């Protein structure tokens, strides 16, 4: 759930800060399709893999979300 909220908050900030170079939901969706898919696929993470592995994967996805929005800001 944290990754979903993180994505929403960063998307909202990106749209607000976009200025002349308008960032829209469509632009975010096109440039981050893989990341959005990974967020929606989090529900398939098997708890039998162990808490440590699950938490590691969620943190890895969180970092990917940060990096994707950083790249979007720089473009």
Image: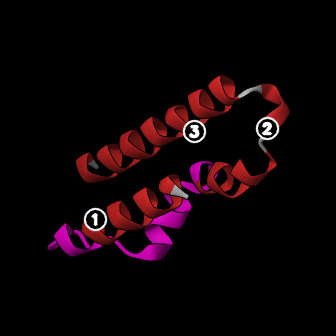
Give residue 14's mark: 1
Question: x, y percentage for residue 13?
Answer: 25, 67
- The residue mark sitting in front, 1 or 2, is 2
39 relative position to 4: left or right: right
Q: Residues within 10 Å of mark 2 (few under 14, many from 20)?
A: few
Mark 1 secondary-structure assignment: helix
28 in magenta: yes
Task: Name above or below for residue 39 compared with residue 15.
Answer: above
Circle 3 SS class: helix
- Circle 2: element type: helix
| Sequence order check, earlier mark of 3 and 2 | 2
Horizontal and vertical percent for residue 67? 38, 39
In the image, the segment drawn in magenta is 15-35
Frontmost of labels 3 and 2 is 2
How far is the residue under mark 3 from the one under mark 2?
12 Å
- What distance separates the C-alpha of mark 1 from that of mark 3? 22 Å
- Badge 3 is on which residue? 58
Circles 1, 3 touching at the beta carbon (< 8 Å): no
């Amino acid at each position: 759930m944290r990754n979903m909220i993180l994505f929403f908050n960063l998307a909202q900030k990106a749209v607000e800060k976009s200025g002349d170079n308008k960032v829209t939901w469509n632009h975010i969706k096109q440039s981050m399709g893989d990341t959005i898919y990974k967020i929606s696929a989090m529900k398939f993470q098997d708890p039998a893999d162990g808490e440590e592995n699950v938490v590691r994967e969620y943190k890895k996805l969180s970092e990917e979300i940060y990096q994707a929005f950083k790249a979007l800001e720089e473009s």
